[in-house]
Image (tube, rainbow, N blue to C red):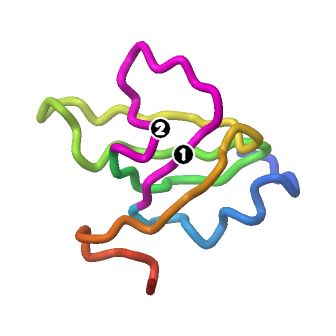
């Protein structure tokens, strides 16, 4: 079936494959996901009203967690300086 596309996430296509810091609004982060801009993620896929990211600096070597984020909760996505991939900024 695949991932459906919606207009919400079309603005994030540029970031697929990029390393970024992500800021979301009003999150209760009991799992230390780093969605306050404190961690660096690689954007894996953009879908219908969500994006899927991978933590590029996992806390544990075996921890390759993927996180699905609701696009409507994203306040900002910023290229990650110092990662060799700062989105041309």
Tags 1 and 2 in contact by the CB under 8 Å rule? Answer: yes
| Direction bottom: furthest residue | 88
Residue at x-position 46% and y-position 20%: 29
Residue 5, percent across and down?
82, 53
Please tell me which residue is depicted at 57% across the width and 35% down the height of the picture: 68
Q: What label sits on residue 41 in the rendered view?
A: none
Q: Which of pointers 1 and 2 lies earlier in the amino acid sequence?
A: 1
Q: Residues within 10 Å of mark 2 (few under 14, many from 20)?
A: many
Most extreme residue toward the left is 61
Q: Which residue is mark 2?
A: 35
The picture quadrant where one finds residue 86 is: bottom left
**Residue at image location 38% in from the left, 17% down from the top:** 31
The spot of residue 32 in percent (x, y) is 36, 24
Q: Is residue 35 magenta?
A: yes
Q: How many marks?
A: 2
- Residue 70 image offset from top left, x and y in percent: 69, 36
Label 1 crowd bin: few (<14), some (14–19), many (20+), radius 10 Å? some
Provide the major secondary structure of the magenta segment: loop
Q: Identify the residue at horizontal 44%, vertical 86% (top origin).
A: 88
**As drawn, which residue projects farthest toward the top?**
30
Cα distance, mark 1 to mark 2? Answer: 5 Å
- Assess whether residue 63 is covered by the magenta stretch: no
From the image, tell me which residue sits under label 1: 23
Quadrant containing the N terminus in the rendered view: top right
Indicate whether 83 appears above or below 31: below
Residue 79, above or below 24: below
Specify the segment rendered in magenta: 20-38
Instruction: Answer left or right for 29 relative to 11.
Output: left
Say what secondary structure mark 1 lies in: strand
* Quadrant of the image occupied by residue 27: top right
- Give the quadrant of the C terminus: bottom left
**Is residue 87 rendered to the left or right of residue 59?**
right
């Amino acid at each position: 079936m695949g991932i459906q596309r919606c207009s919400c996430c079309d603005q994030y296509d540029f970031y697929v494959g990029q390393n970024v810091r992500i800021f979301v609004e009003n999150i209760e982060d009991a799992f230390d996901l780093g969605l306050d801009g404190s961690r660096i993620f690689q954007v894996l896929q953009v879908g219908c009203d969500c994006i899927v990211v991978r933590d590029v600096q996992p806390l544990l070597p075996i921890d390759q967690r993927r996180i699905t984020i609701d696009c409507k909760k994203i306040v900002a996505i910023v290229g990650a300086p110092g990662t060799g991939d700062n989105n041309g900024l």
